[in-house]
Amino acid sequence: MLERKIGATMTKILIIEDESELVRILRSYLEKAGYSVITTGRGDLGLVMWEREKPDLVLLDLNLPGMDGLDVAREIRRKSETPIIMVTARVEETDRLIGLELGADDYILKPYSPREVVARVRTVLRRTGPRTGSPNQVIRLGDLEIDLDAHTLIRSGETVDLTPTEFSLLVTLASQPGRAFSRLQLLESAQGSAYEGYERTIDAHIKNLRSKLEPDPKQPYYIETVFGVGYRFRKF
């Protein structure tokens, strides 16, 4: 069933991957799940396609000809909050953290199950899309206004752009001020599942969120670190 649509247009996924067999498999699974898929095997062409096609999500390999995947992610983030899922064989934690700090919403290591990729895509897009069937929900704390339906954050009258993962983390924390959440709890909240060994990636997302939210990220006012546990939102 073709269930993923934005307005009257099918949700569009851009795959930037140079392994043709992987592209073929991912395209097949994603199209069966109801997505429109466009692909390229080069990083530089991927950036061109992203600007031209305006996809709803990017599946991005890191080891690419033409332009490294991290540089592609950096350019996309400089201009837009388009959701990015990095799909790569790089196993070093440093690469993963760099990708997340650049603003990637998720990170999948090869080899992987195509069904897992579809599930991750669905989870990220669910966080991005509008909510239906419920009244408008707004969280107001201090000088923050978090609109769950519009998927927006306003601080002191100014709009703050967040990635879907950053917004999801903010909503989880701000919905229960004063409650300490473990990294695994935040990971499950943000990505739909808590993948073993990935809980430290929450630190990268929190760092990004603080850089946008806090007046002084080095001395956080809103998001407090709970040593030995995780994080909590300041209780007003």
Image (cartoon, rainbow, N blue to C red):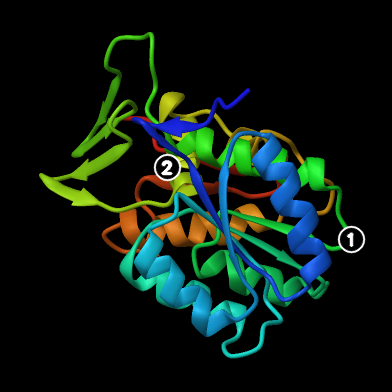
Identify the residue at image location x=58%, y=27%: 2
- Whether tag 1 and tag 2 are in contact, CB under 8 A, the answer is no
Three-letter code for the amino acid on which mark 2 is drawn: Phe
- Above or below 186: residue 199: below
Residue 60 makes an appearance in the image: yes
Q: Nearer the viewer, residue 107 or 63?
A: 63
**Residue flagged by tag 1: what amino acid is it?**
Pro
Residue 88, numbered label: none
User: Farthest residue in the bottom direction?
Assistant: 66
Find numbered disc 2 in the image and state the secondary structure of the residue it sits on: helix
Q: Compared to 189, does 81 lie above or below?
A: below
Q: Secondary structure at mark 1?
A: loop
Check the image and report above or below for 66 versus 114: below
Q: Nearer the viewer, residue 71 or 9?
A: 9
Mark 1 Cα within 10 Å, few/some/many (few <14, many 20+)? few
Q: Which residue is mark 1?
A: 111
Instruction: Please indicate whether residue 133 sits to the left or right of residue 36 in the image.
Output: left
In the picture, measured across the screen, residue 181 lies left or right of residue 165, that is right
